[in-house]
Image (cartoon, rainbow, N blue to C red):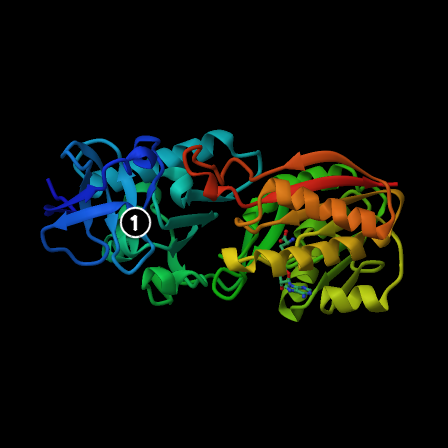
Amino acid sequence: MKSFENSAVKVFLKKGREKSVKNFHPWIFSGAIERITGEFSPGDIVSVFSSDGVFLAKGFINPQSQIRLRILSFLEEPIGPEFFIGRISDAYRYRQSILPARTNAFRVVHGDGDCLSGLVIDKYDSVLVIQLFSKGMEKLRPHLGEWMESVFSPAVILERTESFSLAEEGIPAKKEIIKGKVPVELCVEEHGMVFRVDVWNGQKTGFYLDQRDNRQRLAACSGGKKVLNCFSYSGGFSVAAALQGAITVSGDVSEKALELARQNFKLNGIPLVGHRFEAADVFDFFQNNKEQYEVVILDPPAFIKKRMQILKGARAYQEINRLAMTRVQTNGLMLSCSCSAHLSWDLFQKIVFAAAQQSGRAVQIIGRYGQPPDHPINIYHPEGEYLKSLLLRII
Ligand code: SAH
């Protein structure tokens, strides 16, 4: 049986530092390591032992990263192609079991959330988009095509390894077609709505799959209302609201994103008349536009990408939330989101509290939502929770 392991290497943890591994946390930081025996190269799969030699786990080693080891298994099981194909198939089967009707775009593998540290796979109908975030997964890149073939038989596979955090893992960015040809006009279904997805040039892997459930929730309370969708990207929230009869304004700094949004309106049979698409920085938009709305959606990009940006990012969240609140009509609704993993629920709510106070509005929290079930959070890896949304009633 083929193995990907480097069995010549043993990593021993410092005495008393095995606690997090025993709690099934998938990351081991450099400070916990006592010594390493044997020769290895970055990304190898090695075994980890306690200081007195008891087997603890197997995972990717990367001397360049603060996250020195990314654990794949806490069992003494062989790690070869069957291991990865098995994990990916399990993740896929689970998604198929929870997927809403008339939806063919979803995340199949969500990194540590699926115990596959550094691997993200999004499926858009028969197109797979892969992102690699760990040196170990990057090293296994030559096998990806084969694994994808055996689990999905996709028409197209492409890799978009482009995240800001790659340097920390020592991975170069890569954008490459692994199989097939990128469709010129790829359209997917979400709850029966149709969205055009630009998997090659679009943001993330082409679509914000993680807002699927929030789009549904928002649509349910937008019927016939005047809706402002800030940071709209390709208009997901706008389309969902407009299909319920809402009159929408979509604001995004990217004209390309707004062009996709217009196409998405048409694809869903919504005439553009009455709907507006504003290509502007949202902060400027609020400066220049004093209109009031019955529903405001605020889904900014991650203002905090690294821990050291928390203070600066928190100020930006507070300011944008304050501005948005001033534009919500009495008894209107606002959906405020943050996709910064470094921002805790507690701090997020404090920021929204401060924004409410500054805007002088009375605010009720009427919903609190996290990631959809195709973006699972491994309970032993709370760092995997990134999306936080508060549905607010602004009085
Ligand atoms: N709500 C969207 C996803 C939003 S992602 C959805 O459900 O699909 C964040 C968006 O904010 C991106 O489209 C990006 O182009 C836009 N953006 C980033 N900075 C901005 C700014 N300062 N003003 C306006 N839009 C901005």
Q: Horizontal placement of 54 versus 106: left or right? A: left
Query: Is residue 333 or residue 267 the one in the foreground?
Result: 333
Query: Is residue 207 or residue 295 the one in the foreground?
Result: 295
The mark total stands at: 1
Is residue 222 placed above or below 249 in the rendered structure? above
Is residue 246 placed above or below 197 in the rendered structure? above
**In this view of the protein, can residue 272 be seen by the observer?**
yes
Amino acid at pointer 1: Gly
At a point 75% along the width and 48% down the height, the residue shown is 354
Tell me the SS state at disc 1: helix
Residue 66 rendering spot, x and y as whole percentages: 34, 55
Which residue is label 1 attached to? 31
Is residue 320 placed above or below 367 in the rendered structure? below
Residue 306 rendering spot, x and y as whole percentages: 50, 58
At a point 56% along the width and 34% down the height, the residue shown is 100
In the image as oriented, which residue stretches furthest toward the front? 15
Q: Quadrant of the C terminus?
A: top right
**In this view of the protein, can residue 126 be seen by the observer?**
no
Residue 277 rendering spot, x and y as whole percentages: 76, 64
Ligand 1 resides in the quarter of the picture at bottom right
